Amino acid sequence: MEFHLQLNHNETWNMSRLHFHDHCELLLPLVSPGNIFVSDQVYPLRRGTLYLIGENTLHRTMAEGFHARYVLHINKKALTQLSTPQTDLTQFCGAAFRRAELSTGEMTEIIELFQALERNKNDGSFGSDTRQLVALLNLLIRVAPTLNVADAGESIHNKDFLRVAPILDYIRDNLSEPLTLDQIAGQFYISKHYLCRVFKAATGFSVMEYIIYSRVLKARQLLQEGVSVQQAGELSGFSDNSHFIRTFGHLTGLTPGRYAKEYQSGDQVLLRGEIRP
């Protein structure tokens, strides 16, 4: 069963790069360390909230200082295997992003379920795989109804982000076109220096970083649909095929051709296609 659970504690931690993957992510912060950028919006990252980040969703945790959280990664294939006609566990992975506010009692209950899954590791001994599967099912069955009725909720609309939101929309709508700092700044009648400064202040990363990661994400989605490597590169805004192959491989650890082959065969390894920090 392909899933991966982590309990992470970091005294000083910040996700320095954007991030996406081929599986769903359940995130349960145990503290309130900052914000999360996801689907071109910024949301608070708070204890007492359960977060669901869907497949192929560009995101980055914007946390400073101590950060503790449970993170469960599970792909749709595993959720399909665990589902029944009466209990469809794949449905809560249909959205790019959801968050559910939890009561104190619900938070305690869900933490205990994460702890049970953490304790019941499959160590190869008799029954350990079954105990692990039961712990995983108990967690998923508990959180699925809560997440099925949840949505993204209100994003943070600070002054900097309101300035950047139209720029994010413009980049997303013109990703297949040539995009430069000068061209984007001219489109919005602002200086290149101001564009870089306000974009970084609002999102935590640079304009060109966002463009490159967005293009690789779009190319991955096209490859998943069976589009050829060359066409996927062109449609996602890479003018040179060799540059596309090199960039894709650098960020994902796989060439576009290898990624497409593994995805289409269903043999992709969990976390393999993840953008590496």
Image (tube, helix red, strand yellow):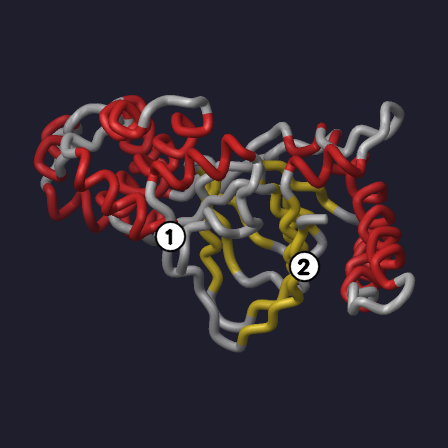
- Residue name at image x 46 percent, y 44 percent: 20
Task: Identify which amino acid the numbered label 2 is placed on.
Answer: Leu
Quadrant in the picture for residue 236:
top left
Rendered location of residue 74, percent (x, y) = 65, 46
Task: Please name the residue that numbered disc 2 is placed on.
Answer: 5
Camera-near label (1 vs 2) is 1
Q: Nearer the viewer, residue 248 or 43?
A: 248
Q: Nearer the viewer, residue 227 or 165?
A: 227
Task: Please name the residue that numbered disc 1 is placed on.
Answer: 253
Quadrant in the picture for residue 147:
top right
Residue 98 visible? The answer is yes
Rendered location of residue 133, percent (x, y) = 83, 52
Query: Eyeballing the image, is 150 above or below 104?
Result: above
Query: Eyeballing the image, is 271 above or below 66?
Result: above
Query: Eyeballing the image, is 109 above or below 260?
Result: below
Residue 184 visible? The answer is no
| Element type at mark 2 | strand
Q: Describe residue 20's horizontal placement relative to residue 215 as left or right.
A: right
Q: Describe residue 75's horizontal placement relative to residue 204 as left or right.
A: right
Q: Earlier in the sequence, mark 1 or mark 2?
A: 2
Query: Eyeballing the image, is 129 above or below 187?
Result: below
Task: Identify which amino acid the numbered label 1 is placed on.
Answer: Gly
Quadrant of the image containing the C terminus: bottom left
- Residue name at image x 30 percent, y 52 percent: 250
* Classed neighbour count for the residue bearing mark 2: other residues with Cα under 10 Å, few (<14), some (14–19), many (≥20): some
- Residue name at image x 49 percent, y 72 percent: 65
| Element type at mark 1 | loop
Rendered location of residue 125, percent (x, y) = 85, 69
Q: Describe residue 77's horizontal placement relative to residue 82 as left or right.
A: left
